Image: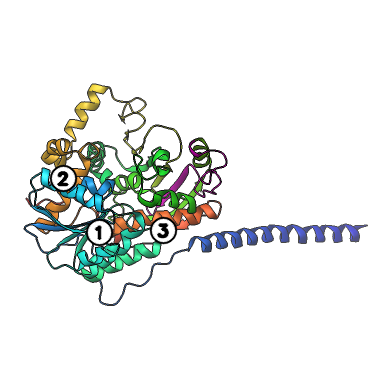
Amino acid sequence: MNKRLNQFLATALIFLMAGLFGCNTNREQKEDKLFEAREVFEAPERPAGQKHVLELRAEPIDTVRIGLIGLGMRGQGAVHRLSFIEDAVIVAMVDVVPENVERAQETLRQLGRPQADSYTGSEDWKAVCERNDIDLIYVTTHWDLHAPIAIYAMEHGKHVTTEIPAALTVQEAWQLVNTAEKTRRHMMMLENCNYDFFEMATLNMAQQGLFGELVHAEGAYIHDLRSMLFAQEGEPGHYWDMWRLKHNETRNGALYPMHGLGPLAHALNIHRGDRMEYLVSVSSGQFGLTEYAKDKFGEDSEYAQRNFKRGDMNTTIIKTLKGKTIKIQHDVTSPRPYSRIHMLSGTKGFAQKWPRTGIALEPNAHSYLSDEALDSLLQVYEHPLVKEIGEKARQVGGHGGMDFIMDYRLIYCLRHGLPLDQDVYDAAEWSAVIELSEVSVANQGMPVKIPDFTRGAWDELKAVTYYTAD
């Protein structure tokens, strides 16, 4: 009896130990596998002879001569705004739609600016990049051409700025970085939301420690674009060749993270003392595009039968190396009010722009400041750049004036040989979220590591600086 009992206990102990160690081994293997899965995009070695372009300074330019490529909605606005900057002149303009070029020329005429050389060929952007009388290439085409034009422009000695996103893939983002480092030319993405008056005020507050240590931030691009995505030629808001709808049809992720992410990244000093380490991303199912297509074109229409890939709401969570978290949302197909959220939360306070603009501070952070106290605080912390140019920006316009501040700052920094407010690493990091989020969505929210586009230089700077010549 004792022998059988001992055999039973010994067998049970073996199974128990095997179970304990087996489970632990399996868990470790699963964690190792997950960690390996996060290593999706390795950072390539920096090409020999290159160095980073953090806070790059180039030779000052007295009058910035511009080649503007793409004259759709954003391009037309750029022509208008740049015409109010005396130290900038548009030398050449390109668009495959001749009527767009003529419309832009008319804007120049009305504002008393010189006529620019016109180009309408599909490859004419290359000829403009090759000209010797241009300092800056300003890109406002559809998304697919942003990176190719930017790379070509830098290779031909031009500074370049491009509408968002600057890149559609991680590979394109690395090409931008490598080309900027090789040519020592400025490459900036036109993230206008960094220059919104509230965003600039809260950046100033964060840099002066009003919120304490920032811990968490949220941003978004929630904008009902259904009528524009499906707009036919001649209808208001039509995208040439319906290019934006095509992206929504074939890709699923955070396709437009920059508006929400850009201001947050600067408030958190990304690649200037901290860096984004990894993300996880999930998308809802797709409902909005199909329903809208049925309502507009009919149940049996070709558009209603399409298999649109992008889920209506994408939510992406980013973790930084120093333990901060960022939530970014993207939804352009739901009937809801516009919002970029823009929320900063720290150890001493909180600020948010949408759906309610408000700030809460210790010791009474459970409640928003009164409207009077909020207005007073925003005046005290008004960003110096807004104090300098804000009134003219409101007059010229462009999303309330932030577009003009963006253009003004670009020209100002080029004229004075200063580092630009946004650099190629901003463009690469914020744009890379697109493909990285797609990978995570396709793998049930798998963590995906974010490449260090500075290749280790992210901690050489300690804060974002908007330089002035004074």
Q: The magenta stretch spans which residues? A: 296-323
Task: Using the numbered discs, state the Cα–Cα distance from disc 3 to disc 1 in whole angstroms.
Answer: 39 Å
x 14%, y 41%: residue: 384
Q: Is residue 421 left or right of residue 11?
A: left
Task: Name the residue carrying label 2.
Answer: 107
Q: Is residue 218 magenta?
A: no
Q: Which residue is mark 1?
A: 120
User: Which comes sooner in the sequence, label 2 or label 1?
Assistant: 2
Can residue 312 be found in the magenta stretch? yes
Q: Main secondary structure of the magenta part?
A: loop
Marks 3/2 in contact by CB < 8 Å: the verdict is no
Q: Measure how far apart labels 2 and 1 are at the Cα level.
A: 17 Å
> Residue 412, image x and y in percent?
12, 52
Q: Answer few, some or many: residues within 10 Å of disc 2's Cα (few below 14, many 20 plus, some between 14 and 19).
A: some
Please name the amino acid that badge 1 sits on.
Thr
Which element carries disc 1, helix, strand or loop? Answer: loop
Query: Residue type at mark 2?
Result: Thr
Q: Nearer the viewer, residue 203 or 322?
A: 203
Between tags 3 and 1, which lies in front?
1
Does 382 appear above or below 154? above
One can see residue 249 in this view: yes
Residue of label 3: 450
Q: Percent position (x, y) of residue 462?
A: 25, 54
